[in-house]
Every structure is written in C-alpha cells, then in structure tokens.
Amino acid sequence: LQGGAVAILTAAERPGHFAGMVLISPLVLANPESATTFKDYSRILKHLMEKASRMLKFWIPRPFWVLAAKVLNLVLPNLSLGPIDSSVLSRNKTEVDIYNSDPLICRAGLKVCFGIQLLNAVSRVERALPKLTVPFLLLQGSADRLCDSKGAYLLMELAKSQDKTLKIYEGAYHVLHKELPEVTNSVFHEINMWVSQRTATAGTASPP
C-alpha cells in the first residue's frame, strides 16, 4: 500500500538517482470513506469522540479527532483495525481468490500504529510533490477504494516533472496489474511502451 508513497518520497529527495519511475495506484490521498481499514479506524475515533461529546455536553471540533488518533496511537498502538477487505483490491475474482488463499499474506489485521503511519505518509507525500522532477508514468484506477484517484490528479498538478503521463482506468480498482485481463494487458503495454521510448531516446543521445 505504501510502495508508491516511498517511491515518490525517495525520488523527490534524491532526483539524481533516478532516470524515471512508473507509479501504479500510489498513495497520495487515502480513501477513508471506502476502504474497510480506514472506515474501521474512523469509526473507532468517531465513536470515542461522540461518546466524549455526550459526556461533556458540547460538540468536539474535527481537529480534535486528529489529536484523538494520536492519543489512541500512544495508548493502543497495537489495536487491530481488521484486515483489508480483499474485494476492493481487484474486480478479477480469480486474483482475489489467489490473494485470499496465499499463505504468505498476513491475516492479523492492520494496527492503529500502521494507520497513523499511513496518515503521516500522505502528509509527507503532499509536501514532497512540488519537489518531484523525475519523469514518471502514473497509472490509476478510477474506482480505487484504497488510494483515492483524486491523488493522481493532485500529483500531476503539483509535480514539477517536465515529462509526466497519467492514464486513468475507468472502473478499475487498486491492483491494476492483477485486474480484469483488458486492464492488466493495457497496464503492461503502457509500461513497456513508456520505458522503451525513453531508453531508445537515451540510447540515441548517448555518445558512441
């Protein structure tokens, strides 16, 4: 889930180390309204804050929710928020079934401390976007319920890269390389073409 965020942060910090990068559904904006993990996290916070509001007889502003999240992280960092709902990963049921039966997938559930790290990562990525100058290809599903597709447009708007390409797959979920065959085939084709064109250009420009 954080691979794209790590790539963006690293490329922004050390642009000289990279000739370009391909991003698939990167974490720029989390989607708390749809992803089960974030919904559970928000539900816990909302329940605690609403209960506190009733006890204290006044409405608690939203900024205090962030504070509550940090307090919860200090008090119960290992509280499980439940596993990611595998149905939001892909529309390809075969791939979802493979994911569900994979013995190497952790079933323990994501923890509060991980949720906090995701929120921190989103904040860091947003600050890093104007520093991003490397060429990139960005592939994003419009129905991604883990990483909000609005983040792709934000990345395109704020990144200073002169060579940046965005392709949106309508209706596709998060794991584009394991989506429906027509999406997956297109994803690999786009990546192959993007890399081939730039390596060919680099080869032509190189001295003999």
Image (cartoon, helix red, strand yellow):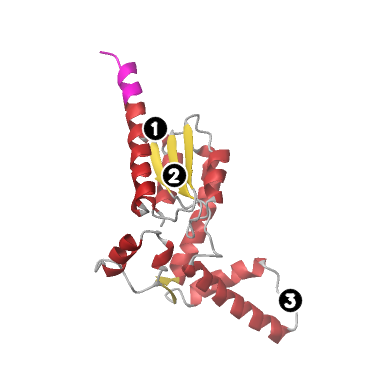
The circle drawn on residue 16 is 1
Residue type at mark 2 is Leu
Tag 3's secondary structure?
Answer: loop
At x 53%, y 34%, the residue is 160
The circle drawn on residue 139 is 2
Count neighbours of disc 1 (C-alpha within 10 A) and say few if under 14, some if 14 to 19, many if 20 or more. few
* Nearest-to-viewer mark from 1 and 2: 2
Q: Quadrant of residue 193?
A: top left
The x and y percentages for residue 184 are 35, 48
Using the numbered discs, state the Cα–Cα distance from disc 1 to disc 2 in whole angstroms. 23 Å
Residue furthest to the bottom in view is 55
Relative to the observer, which residue lies in front, 183 or 50? 183
Residue type at mark 3 is Trp
Q: Earlier in the sequence, mark 3 or mark 2?
A: 3
Q: Earlier in the sequence, mark 3 or mark 1?
A: 1
Query: Which portion, as a residue range, is magenta?
Result: 200-208
At x 53%, y 43%, the residue is 155
Quarter of the image with the C terminus is: top left
Tag 1's secondary structure?
Answer: helix
Magenta segment: does it hold 201? yes
Q: Earlier in the sequence, mark 1 or mark 2?
A: 1
Relative to the observer, which residue lies in front, 82 or 145? 145
Residue 38 lies, with reference to residue 182, above or below; the image says: below
Count neighbours of disc 2 (C-alpha within 10 A) and say few if under 14, some if 14 to 19, many if 20 or more. many
Tag 2's secondary structure?
Answer: strand
Residue 159 lies, with reference to residue 60, above or below; the image says: above
Callout count: 3
Using the numbered discs, state the Cα–Cα distance from disc 3 to disc 2 in whole angstroms. 41 Å
Give the residue pinned by disc 3. 59
Count neighbours of disc 3 (C-alpha within 10 A) and say few if under 14, some if 14 to 19, many if 20 or more. few
The x and y percentages for residue 203 are 30, 21
